[in-house]
Amino acid sequence: MAALVVAEHDNAALKPATLNAVAAAKEIAGEGVDILVAGKDCRAVAEAASVVAGVRRVLLADDGAYDHGLAENVAPLLVRLAEGYSHLLAPATTSGKNLMPRVAALLDVMQISDISAVVSPDTFVRPIYAGNALQTVQSKDPIKVITVRGTAFPPGEATGGSAAIEAIAPTGSAGLSEFVRAELSKSERPELTSARIIISGGRGMQSGDNFHLLERVADRLGAAVGASRAAVDAGFVPNDYQVGQTGKIVAPELYIAVGISGAIQHLAGMKDSKVIVAINKDEEAPIFQIADYGLVGDLFKILPELDAELERRQ
Amino acid sequence: MKALVAVKRVIDYNVKIRVKADKTGVETANVKMSMNPFDEIAVEEALRLREAGIIEEVIAVSLGVAQCQETIRTALAMGADRGVLVETTAELQPLAVAKLLKAVIVQEGPEIVIIGKQAIDDDCNQTGQMLSALLGWPQATFASKLKISDGHAEVTREVDGGLETVAIKLPAVITTDLRLNEPRYASLPNIMRAKKKPITTTTPEALGVDVTPRLVVLKVEEPPKRQGGHKVGSVAELVDKLKTEARVI
């Protein structure tokens, strides 16, 4: 059994989601876990991958064609490498979800999407219906192409390993697509999918300007700021804040939902958090049914109070 | 230029699903079925391209049991020109769907294929990517903005860190994200008119596609229930509990 994990990165740094996928790969293939770093001028990423604990080998494909991770260019590389592996894995991030089904189709196998548990090397658990049911599936395909739900696998250690880095020949550009530009949100706060604490706002925030109330508490706690789909649809914050079935799936140590009623689609994205706090003026809001600690009241009073209380007790 | 949209019949997004007692799946008897919401966005986008004069015809394809005709009729009522039903009672997984769609596309010759980024039943998020791979076409997934001009599409995509724009050559497959557009409602006259629009029916056998599932579903279960519902009386009590009981801050 050998597994190849596709590294998530921006050519400069290895993204934490990779470590969750490595953890899943280790459950499947034990010591036979390799990491593929495909990018441009991405040697630093390969070096970071080489010290991830328990990794056997790092394959480095450094080429202009892989600069922005275009699926049309990266998929043929994975297809070429597939011969040496029983499993190909990637984090279930937007880049993993974009790439892996293309790889699976070229290999004529089904992908197993967004796995949340490994039962055996060919059997996996995955959420369906926005996490309202769990499906256990067994793959009959010779190669398993898998995306991994990061929140379901505690990340492996980022250091302690000493894998060799092996440069591999690129497959070139497919000539089908080109990167034009990226508009990425800049933030000093942690990323939503890897934050230890998240504080999210919903429609109850009433405006984008009011999010500064959340941000103050977030900075006090070293937390990331998220939002419900209702807040995104209302234009309060950009879509990459969105937590839920149609946004990001998160499972931090502490999730604070503020002015969020608790639509199924939002719960699907955060109900695996360790501790959930709900702050809402409507005591009938469904969010309270899953919250470990609910506080009924006006968020415009509670948030400044919370900020002051945290300051006092720091 | 033609556009092809694929529309899946799924349990309506407002229905609270129930897992069957024998763990073989989810209860679908007497449950309201609708078009997958991401596919509605795909239909809407294709209609807008036609209204902008970029394409001439919108073909709506659905795959599955005979009742998928209703899903096609919904697309026709929104404004699609005609439908194709690939009828089968077999379980269809994304790889098989991609192969069937490819066979239909070879017959119909569209230059733009628009489909939802995922279906809200199996949440697979695979079919568009697989289809473009099988066709050897480019793909633009999770689209929130689409611009077509001389043989190219410029597509803005929703990615984890924000937005990314790619330029792809046509023909291509585009998968829709939520913010691409707001689908229209079908008006009553258009619902009546849709009844007269043509739907052709074919089968996996006629298209020469083996749809044998590659994944065997061993069981479907309910997720563990979360124990919640505790209330605190004040901010001070909340902070106290988080510090001393939950120990998370």
Image (cartoon, coloured by chain):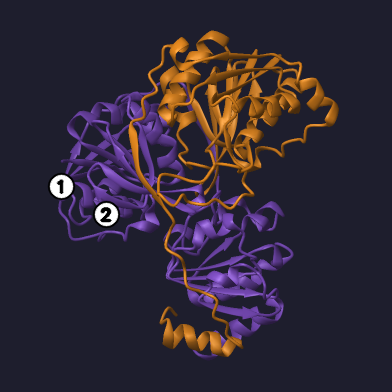
Per the rendering, the mark at residue A56 is: 1
Left or right, A1 with reference to A236: left
Which residue is label 2 attached to?
A: A23
Q: Give the vertical position of B35 relative to B222 (above or below).
A: above
Label 1: chain? A
- What residue is shown at x 69% (from left), y 58% (from top)? A236
Specify whether A141 is left or right of A231. left
In terms of secondary structure, where does tag 1 sit?
Answer: loop
Crowd rating for badge 2 (residues with CA inside 10 Å; few <14, some 14–19, many 20+): many
Are there few (<14), some (14-19), or many (20+) residues within 10 Å of tag 1?
many
Q: Nearer the viewer, mark 1 or mark 2?
A: 2
Q: Colour of chain B?
A: orange
Colour of the chain lettered A: purple
Residue A37, visible in the rendered structure: no
Q: Which residue: 48% across, 23% down?
A: B138
Label 1 to label 2, Cα distance in Å? 13 Å
Name the residue nearer the viewer: B230 or A64.
B230
Q: Amino acid at mark 1?
A: Arg
Q: Residue at x 59, y 86 (%)?
A: B235
